[in-house]
Amino acid sequence: MDAFILNFSNFAILADAAEVAPACPTACEFALNILLKVVFSLVCVVVVMSFAGLSVVAERKVCAYIQGRYGPNRTAIPIVVAIPILGNFLKKNGLMQLVADGLKFLLKEDPLPAHVNKFWYMIAPVMALSPVLIAACVIPFGVYWTDGGVMAPLAVANFDVSLLFALAIGALGVYGAIMAGWSSNSKFPYMGGMRASAQVISYELAMGLSVLSVVLMVGTNANVDSPLSMFEIGKAQSGLWFCITQPVAALIFLIALFAETNRLPFDMAESETDLVSGFHTEYGSFKFGLFFVGEYGHMVVGSSLFITLFLGAWNPFPGFVWPESWGWISSALSLLTFLVKIAAMLFFFIWVRWTLPRFRYDQVMRIGWKAMVPLALLNFVAYLVFVSI
């Protein structure tokens, strides 16, 4: 009898194990999803860093074209130049200049000044670049359709307040400039850090007010789950883009974006004419290179935000969307559309830099507080009244 009970118990244990076994594929699917997220995170980092690196070359070439010069066209790597057609193309277009600059930053002497606050001095370049890579995880670079026919974003993370997350994390980049200016224990870097903080406070308010009108318009759609989701904002522009329906908000956001990224004519934090190099005067070699890449990375993420909010996100034209019936081709075209728009925005950034003169610091503050903020507030109130009526 005892043997029968023991055998029956063993059978029950085996039966329970058989019932648990089907849960294994769920665990495998969970691990696969985590792996895909990690891979896509790396892809996002590669995309942002690639655009940031190529922007350095584009800055030189576009500047040269505007000024009637050739730009870099002699930098060459012997092994690459030996490749027929491709080597000559890379050399003439200056694309090997990126490799030359990278090697220069890595191989140059990297002294540590004795008068700096060493800990914060070393952390500042990392703080300038890290927010860019974090904010990129919520950017919807395109769309795809699940097996159930549901549209989903090509993004590492998709949650209801992704817009707030991107704006909050992106604004942390100014801490790198503040840390660098303060830790350098030098007059000009300190002034550059203070200018950067004052400029961000001035223009962040106008940027937030311009975004509110977009959120208000998206929130009036009954089919939208969360108006603070960047994916939902992108889907809401399947018809007219918001740059057409809200041109004032788009203009305010664009101007504030130039100020946020410290680009001319708003580069008060590193104005060469009166601050030598501003907050990164005491930096050189690889640490200076991190500041350099961080600036262009902020341009990439800022351009992505502007594209998602006002330029139709992954949609190629107003009133036209890539059809679901095309499957993965539509997904690839949506991603390509977004990347082309980023490239166009970066060209616009560079074009403005080499066209407009730098403002004075008092003019920058006056534009921010006396023009941008009142105009953004008036625009928001006007759309609030319009939606209420």
Image (tube, helix red, strand yellow):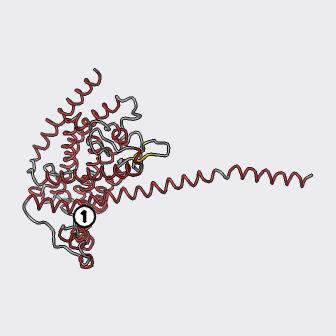
Asked if residue 117 is positioned above or below residue 384 in the image, the reply reads below
Among all residues in the image, which is located at the extreme top? 389
Where's residue 162, x and y in %?
37, 43
Asked if residue 314 is positioned above or below residue 378 in the image, the reply reads below
Where's residue 72, x and y in %?
15, 68
Residue 109 sits in which quadrant? bottom left
**Residue depicted at x 26% and y 64%:** 287
Along the viewing direction, whichever of 264 and 240 lies nearer the viewer: 240
Among all residues in the image, which is located at the extreme front? 325
| Residue at the disc numbered 1 | 289
Pick the quarter of the image with the C terminus. top left
How many other residues sit within 10 Å of disc 1, few (<14), some (14-19) or many (≥20)? some
> From this viewpoint, is residue 36 visible?
yes
SS type, badge 1: helix
> From this viewpoint, is residue 109 visible?
no
**Residue depicted at x 20% and y 29%:** 378
Where's residue 324, x and y in %?
40, 44
For this view, does 9 lie left or right of residue 202? right
Asked if residue 321 is positioned above or below residue 94 in the image, the reply reads above
For this view, does 268 lie left or right of residue 158? left
Residue 133 sits in which quadrant? bottom left
Along the viewing direction, whichever of 111 and 167 lies nearer the viewer: 167
**Residue depicted at x 22% and y 59%:** 55
Amino acid at dot 1: Gly
Along the viewing direction, whichever of 338 and 290 lies nearer the viewer: 338
For this view, does 218 lie left or right of residue 37? left
